[in-house]
Image (cartoon, grey):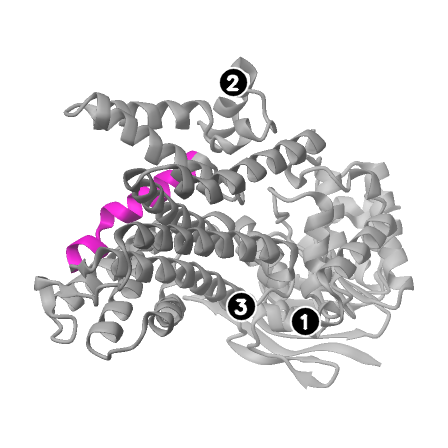
Amino acid sequence: MAQRGDTSKKVILGILIIAGIAIPFFTGNFIIRFFTNALMFAILASAWNIIGGYTGYASFGNVVFLGIGAYVSAVLMEKGGVPFWIAFPASGLGSAVFAVLIGLPVLRLKGHYFAIATLGVAEAMKALVDNLDITEGNSGIYLPVMNLSVKAQYIFFYFMMLGVLALTLIVTYVMLKKKLGYGLIAIREDEEAAGSLGVNTTLFKVTSFALSGFFSGLAGSLYAYQQGFIKPESVFDVGVTVKMIVMAVFGGIGSLLGPLLGALSIEIISEVLTNYFLVAHTLFFGAIVILAIVFTPKGIMDIVSGRKKFGLNYLLQNIRDHRV
Amino acid sequence: MVILEGKGITKVFGGLKAVSEVDFVLNQGEILGLIGPNGAGKTTIINMISGTYAPTEGRVVFKGMDITGKKPYQIGRMGISRTYQIVKPFPGMTVKENVSVGAMFGARGKELSAREAIEKAEAVLEFVGLQEMAEYRADDLNVASRKRLEMAKALAMGPEVILFDEVMAGLNFSEIDKAVDLIQKIRNEGISILVIEHVMRAIKKVCDRIFVLHHGAKIADGTPEEVLNDETVIKAYLGRRYKELVQ
């Protein structure tokens, strides 16, 4: 079983890598832009997976890291005249530092309380940025324009997003092989037992939150630079958090490639639906998400990787395991 | 030589004095039994040693160091590991991964890489006799194996003291005998052990000394012979029928 899962995992990964590198050379600007956006959500969903999937702390405020990343880049580049290559890593670090400061109090909460607290943090940051002078409040802030042709810009941002996604997945993969990964999963499975086995739970949870923040912050920086103009409402939008969680759950939380698969399939499904049903597409989209959760509650990754066979048995097993 | 000592430890929950001024001593290489009726405060004592609760009063001393009020993970790394009465496996992990976590973060954890810790976990599984279930998910195990997994996790930490909280509850006779053998085998490794247990045949077989708790206070302390024939202990815990049954 495991053998078969491993091989098909490798095949999927190979196809994704080749397709990922080839896409911008064979398609037009619209498709490149579409996939750049999908890649951003793949980063956000994969970063959410570190804290929400592996550590078991369902953050409902992860968009705050995107927003901080975006605003760190915007303020540094516009007000400080800092070049992008410095603003970009600074955005990741800024979000990571914020994750540490916020994580220390908030990660003491569990379950629903943690979810609501993180939701509150994101909303509070939106209000703060809305009212600060340095961020130019709710009128939004412009970023310097990139000195490249339109096509070159599209390709640049596409590969930057792809690079950050690859970094996120590689770091997560390495983490899972190391003590950090074992410690995080132990915390998810039983935090008290993890503590008595010698896991410094506070340190591990904060590290996990900071990693999640770091990669989301990098994505935020790229998003802001590509947009050229950002507003608090767009980069601190709760809807973005909901979307990344839906993608992670749809693909399979607590699996390495699940959130990536979830992000790509959800972006593609919703794009196709929008093309065919201009008005009612969200209705069909909702139906698809519901069906997916009912039939594969642990994500489509289980089916795609061949770990589980799709069918009546799997459905019945899911009903036994996850309901009542 | 004394390895672990409680000096006048007291725990108050609201208006309830769960444990009141209990002194105990665990000697190097000894198996010390802790018995008493339900609600006597036995698990609270383990929780105070392992750092889950800070004692309201009194001190816990390990190898001459005051460890009162330290965090559970710090105490675990110093060399005291514990099991839980209501077992706490990591259900989504395999048995081997469960034990590996203990090896990675326990007293010897700093010296081991993740890979070495997994190798150590395999050795521990062999030691406790769970090697055939190494790849099972922890929530697929039966009660006896779960209790054994708890012991394996504690043992993998490389501790000097292990606190066993009712590792035999819910087991049948042959499983109890196996658990008794395992506890003795662990002691032969040079580890000092504190056991909470209700199973008298196991307590008598395995313990060097016993102390008895009743309503949070220590009412007896001594060899199994002395304690199990003590009139107050019989009145508070064992009951008169026990004496008749034994004779």
Residue at which label 2 appears: A316
Residue B169, image x, y percentages: 71, 44
- Give the main secondary structure, helix, strand or loop, of the magenta stretch: helix
- Residue at 35% of width from left, 46% of height from top? A36
Q: Nearer the viewer, residue B61 or A150?
A: A150
Disc 3: host chain: B
Q: Which mark is residue B53?
A: 3
Look at the numbered discs 2 and 1 and tell me whether their residues touch, using CB distance below 8 Å. no
Numbered tag placed on residue A36 in the rendering: none
Give the CA separation, mark 3 to mark 1: 17 Å
In reply to whether residue A246 is colored magenta, the answer given is yes
Residue at the spot x=30%, y=23% of the render?
A287
Q: Residue at x 87, y 63 (%)?
A: B187
Count neighbours of disc 2 (C-alpha within 10 A) and say few if under 14, some if 14 to 19, many if 20 or more. few
> Which segment did they paint magenta?
A232-250
Quarter of the picture holding the C terminus of chain A: top left
Residue at disc 1, secondary structure? helix
Q: Nearer the viewer, residue A78 or A1?
A: A78
| Mark in front: 3 vs 1 | 1
Label 3 neighbourhood size at 10 Å, few (<14), some (14-19), many (20+)? some
- Three-letter amino acid code at disc 2? Leu
Query: In the image, what residue type sits under mark 1?
Result: Arg
Q: Chain of mark 1?
A: B
Q: Residue furthest left?
A: A139
Query: Distance between the Cα atoms at labels 2 and 1?
Result: 43 Å
State the residue at coordinates (44%, 27%). Answer: A323
Chain letter, disc 2 residue = A
Dot 1: few (<14), some (14–19), or many (≥20) neighbours within 10 Å?
Answer: many
